[in-house]
Structures are given as C-alpha cells and as structure tokens.
Image: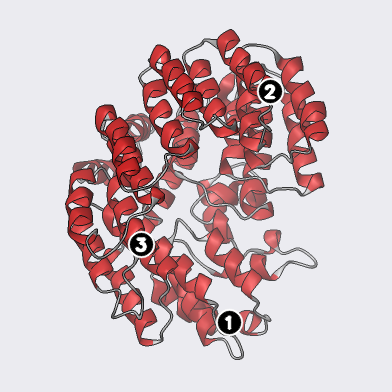
Amino acid sequence: MISRVQHCLKNTQVLIKASISSSLFHATGSSYQEVGQSDIDILIAKVHVGSSDDEVFQCLVNDQECSAIQLSDDLVGKLLHRFKNDWRSALGSFRWAASHPGYKHRPDAYDTMIDILGKMKQMVKMREFLEEMCENHLVTLNTVAKVMRRFAGAGQWEDAVQTFDELGKFGLEKNTKSMNLLLDTLCKENKVEQAREIFLQLKSHILPDAHTFNIFIHGWCKVNRGDEAHWTIQEMKGHGCHPCVISYSTIIQFYCQKYNFSKVYELLDEMVAQGCHPNSVTYTIVMCWLSKSQEFEEALQIAERMKTEGCKPDTHFYNCLIHTLGQAGKVQDAVYVFEVEMLKSGVIPNTSTYNSMISMFCHHDQEHKAFNVLKEMEDMNLCKPDVQTYYPLLKLCFRTNFKESLLNMLLNDIVNKHHLSLDLSTYSLLIHGLCKPKVNKIEWAYHLFEEMIGQDILPRYQTCRLLLDGVRENNMYDAAERIEDFMKKL
C-alpha cells in the first residue's frame, strides 16, 4: 500500500500525503505506526475505503491485533463517527464489533448505523437493518424518527408514512409525540399539504399540542407561504394552545429571509403586545439576517436592544455577534466578545464559536491568530474541531502561493489526529485548489475524486469538469475516460 502512495504522490512525504489519497485514510505502512498507537487508530488503519461491508468485516474479524482490542461503547461510537460518510466501512465495523466476544451494542449504536445507511441513501439496507432491530426488540421512537426522516429525505415520503403506520409492529404507540415526528418529517421535506391531510385524519383520535402547530408554522414558511403560517397562530388559539416565542420567531425568520425587515419589526411589536416577549433566539435571527444584508450597524443595534431588554445571551447569539463584528471589520471588538464578554456572561464557547473566530482571522489574513485559536480549542478541550473548523485554514493553502507543507499538516491533523471524515465541500475545495494552474497537482486531485466516489460522496458537475480538463492536459487518458463515464451518470 505504501508503494501505491509513493507512486501516486511523487516527491512528497508518505506520512502526510497518504491522509488525502485513497490510501491515506487507512494506511498501514510502517511510516504510520507510532509507539502507543490508540485502538481507534489501529482499527481505522485496518479498513480500506471502497471495500464491501463484508470485506471490511472479514478483514477485522481475521486480524489478531483487532481481536485483542478491548471494545467499549466509546470506541465503537468513535469508529462509527469516523465512518459516518462511508457506510460500507461503518456497517462492516459494526458487524465486527457485534461479533466481538463479550461485547454488545447499545441501542444508540444501532440508531447511529440506521442513520448512516439512510444518509448515504442505502434505503434497502436501512429497511433490512430496521427489520433486524425489530426482531431483537431494539426499535425505539428515536429509531423510527431517523428512519422516517431518511425516507422522506430520499424522496420516499410514502415509506415514511408506512413506517409510522407500522409503529404497533415495533411495539410503539401512535400518540401526539409520534404523530408530531411524522408531521415534522414531512414538513421538513416540503410535504406540508400531505402532512396537513394526515393531520386532519389523525386529529380526531390524537390530540394536537402547541408543537404540532409550530411544526406547521415552520412547514408553511419553508414552502414560502407566510400567510398560512400566520393563520396557523389563530388555529393554535382555536385548539386552546398558546403561541410561543418559537411560533413568532419562525415567522420572523421567514420575513428576514425575504429581507422584509419592516414586517419583522411589526411582528416583534405584535409579540410584545401578545405578552410573548422576544428572546435571545428571536434577536439572534434578526441580527444574523441584517448582517447577511450587509446592514451591520443595524444588526449591532439589535444586539444592544436585546441586552437592554434584559435577554440573557447564549452561545448562538455570541457566535452570530462575533461573525457580524468580523464582517463589519471590527476584529478587535470580536476578540473582546470572545475573550472577555462571553467569560463575564458565563457563556461557554462551542465549536461554532471557535470556527467563527478562525474564519474571521483567515478572512482578514491573520493566519497566525487563526492557528492560535485552533491551538486554544484543542488545549481547552471544551469542544472538538470539526471539518468546518479546518475549511478556512485549508483555503489559505491556495489563496496566493501554494502552501504544500501547511496543507500536509492540516490534512494530517484532520484525518490522523482528530479522525474526521472529509465532506463534499472539503473534497471540492481541495480538488479545485489542486487543479489551479499555479498548483497543478492533478494526480493528487484525481485520487481525491476516486476516494469520494468510493465513499458514495458525489462530486459536483463543476468539479468533474475542472478535473477532466486537468487530467486531459496532463495526458491522463484513463482518468479522463473514468471521469467522463461518471459525468454521464450525474
């Protein structure tokens, strides 16, 4: 395998480059073996991207080093998280863990596996897995929620409804909570009218609650029917339910997305008149959308209004405030909020907070400060980096001159240090960057393309077109034919 990496990535260090070639994620060469290598690293190194789930299972079950590992729920959780975008590796690893002597999966591990299969559009396998869970009495309402959402997300909303109809088979009850899950699933996939019809059939024997109507408010807004959303508030009252901050905030967000801020301010006044005062969530929505419309000063005025009215800020509010200040060029003010104000308010930063700071520093060409924030994030251990944490840092590698050593370091941290999977946006960024004329790392870009396909992550047409031009210019004829065949299927 190491020889393959060396062939694909000439004149580079195998250790780093492997982490973004089709061999990198699971390299087993001596370059990767470190004293005290963790169990998760050992397992990941044994799995080969693109293998079938049965091949992954056989690889692990027949490996003495893997057999000697003491499995725990935490280790299995990390393994499934690592392969959340690679269903074959995830399923093979799951089966292997289930066969491991003395280990039994927790119910949430089954739910995670269901979600991975559904996310990767493996609907037949997801249904088979659900039946297997049913036989072992492992299906919970959380399981059903994931199944319904994945069916609806794949355009199979009738199967989502069928799953709801089969609740009794799973030993579950049709009640307000399960009805709301179905309605929410359909509304989130723009099937609001279908959800409405089902609701009218069910409401005679399943009582709706405030959440039921909030689901419809969100659904009507999602399909661009704000009047119906506003009317639903009256319907709520007719059923003895009181509109809450969520009800109004959802409609306010709808008008924010239309940049109709005069209507937004009307609704804010209506809320107060109804005795339903805006909260941090409401004001954060307005501030974020004012910022998106480049109305930075007005956005910051909303932040001050919120504080004046005594609303307690939360992490999401501060994340939006930091982003707004950064966009307005008020970098020092953003730093003050991050380092001083949040601390005084007792609000703990999360991954998005750190991501906002890193993105802001990268945007303003303050690379060293961005890396200082990343180091603080890792040292404080309040939250873990995700792929989005590294996205602006990866962009730095291609902004002016190609920074290959920096790219190598970042990718090694993403894959080998934090065990993160690259997503569509990150793969696209890397391929586009590597195909730039001044970079011209076409062979590297092509192996990323192959890796994406192996994980059932579909490249965008624009990415394929760019890569196709690159491989042709570099006389990579087999690669060009492979890309062309793939593009025909898009």
Q: What residue type is labelled 2?
A: Lys
Q: Residues within 10 Å of mark 3 (few under 14, many from 20)?
A: some
Which residue in the protein does label 2 denote?
307
For the residue labelled by badge 3, is the local secondary structure a helix, a strand or a loop? helix
Q: Which amino acid does label 3 sit on?
A: Thr
Residue appearing at x 79%, y 22% in the figure: 336
**Quadrant where the N terminus is found in the figure:** bottom right
Sequence-wise, the earlier of marks 3 and 2 is 3
Q: Determine whether, in the image, residue 178 is placed left or right of residue 198.
A: right
Q: Distance between the residues labelled 3 and 2?
A: 37 Å
Q: Determine whether, in the image, residue 470 is placed left or right of residue 186.
A: right
Q: How far apart are marks 2 and 1 (CA)?
A: 59 Å
Residue appearing at x 65%, y 23% in the figure: 309
In front: 236, or 163? 236
Q: Residues within 10 Å of mark 2 (few under 14, many from 20)?
A: some
Sequence-wise, the earlier of marks 1 and 3 is 1
Q: Is residue 363 visible?
A: no
Q: Determine whether, in the image, residue 489 is placed left or right of residue 54.
A: left
In front: 279, or 79? 279
**Mark 2 vs 1: CB contact within 8 A:** no
**Mark 3 vs 2: CB contact within 8 A:** no
Which residue in the protein does label 3 denote?
176
Q: 383 above or below 106?
A: above
Q: How far apart are marks 1 and 3 (CA)?
A: 49 Å
Asked where in the image residue 167 lies, by quadrant, the reply is bottom left
How far across and down, in percent of the image, does residue 395 sit? 57, 28
Which residue in the protein does label 1 denote?
63
